[in-house]
Image (cartoon, rainbow, N blue to C red):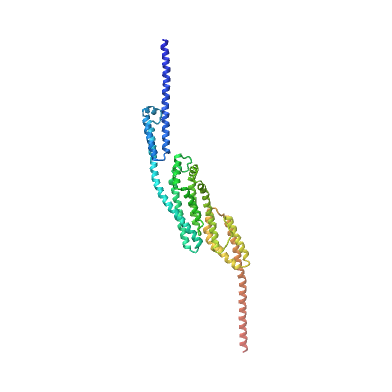
Amino acid sequence: MKKINLLLVLFSIFFLFSQINFAQQDYQIVQNFKSKVKQIDESIKSATTNDKLAQIKTQIDQLSSDYSSKKDLLDKSLYPEDFNGSITKLNNALTLRQGDFGQITNLQTKISQLQTQLDTLNKRNSDLLDQLQQVQSKDKSDIARLNRIIAELRYSLLKRDRLIMSMIDSLMPPSAMGNTNLTSGEQQEIFSKVKKMDMISNIKKSIDDNIKFLSAPALTPNDLNSIKTQQQQFKKMWNTVGPQIISIYSKRHEDEKNLKDIYSSLVSWDNAIVQQAWNSINQSFAVHGIILNQFSNGEEFSQAVSSYINDEIQHASLNKEESKGIYKILVDTVWTTNIKPNWIPFLMDNKLITEAQISTIDAKIAQWKNVAMASSFTWLYIIIPVLLIIIIVIISMLKSSSKNRINIEKEI
């Protein structure tokens, strides 16, 4: 009896250990399956070629074959998913990724076409910039040709900038916009596209050419407003995609100089727009013979105009007529007709001048007007009495002559 009990105990212990061993084996099977599913899923996301996807398809089929005999176990352990659902999910992810590569192929064709357009615009812009420099330095009298070149160059620069921004949108997948946690596959894809298109150099060149264009004469406030809008769009684009590109490129030590220069070039572009506005305003005075002290901000501009008017007010005592003529040119021809309606709104919109600084100029002009008009009235005060005296003398002479004639006639 004791032997039977001992055998039962030993059998129970053996059975218990067997069950534990089987449970451990089942657990290991489930964990291995989960690990391989996860590994394949990550491979699908990081795949960069269709050939790689084909290899992954083979891995999915092999996984299905190897674990099909364990389907019941996996169905119980993978709840709420099951064995077939896990395999289907991998195949669906693979199909979607293959679709991405189909889009990439179409995109590469589009990018190739855009590259051709970009090369054409780069060459055209370089030629126009050379022509602009030649006309400015050698033949300033050819105003019609200068204006034509400026108009063509302005349009061509704008067209290229829009093309570059369009290419950036095409090169950067939506998931990369503003995302700093890209997978290695996504980073490699972006790097390959950007490098192939030489986008960093093209962005830098586009900004530099826009800065060169701002040296052109006769740019209007409307021109600068358009360029300012363009600069802001470019800056917004780079602030969105720049951090990702810099992060990807810096890891590979690629084109680091141009990457760093893009931010500073965008600032230089903005500064060039502001400086061109002040240069154009200064030129508006200079073409009419009014030479102001140099200025590059609203305070300096207000001081320059006020200083000029102060000199003219003092000069009025020496040559009132000349000062009056200069007043009419500065106020009527330049300030009231051009600067106030055209340039002041641009300066105000871009916070380059304040109401107080404009009021200072207006007050100084009013002071000058009082002096100029007073000098005119002084002459009237002198001339009118003289004319009255002359009229009185003439009348007296006529009366005297008439009396003498009457007396003579009486004597006769």
Q: Is residue 8 visible?
A: yes
Q: Residue 337 location in percent, x, y?
A: 52, 62
Front in this rendered view, residue 322 or 390: 322
- How many marks the image carries: the answer is 0
- Quarter of the picture containing the N terminus is top left
Q: Residue 61 location in percent, x, y?
A: 36, 33
Residue lying at the far top in this picture: please name it: 1
Residue 291: quarter of image: bottom right
Q: Residue 395 location in percent, x, y?
A: 61, 79
- Quarter of the picture containing the C terminus is bottom right
Q: Residue at (41%, 33%) from the top-left corner?
A: 37
Residue 124: quarter of image: bottom left
Can you say whether 351 is above or below 61 in the image?
below
Q: Is residue 96 visible?
A: no
Q: Residue at (43%, 13%) from the top-left corner?
A: 6
Q: Residue at (38%, 45%) from the top-left corner?
A: 106
Front in this rendered view, residue 380 or 56: 56
Q: Residue 97 location in percent, x, y?
A: 39, 39
Can you say whether 213 is above or below 104 in the image?
below
Front in this rendered view, residue 190 or 2: 190
Front in this rendered view, residue 59 or 329: 59
Can you say whether 217 is above or below 198 in the image?
below
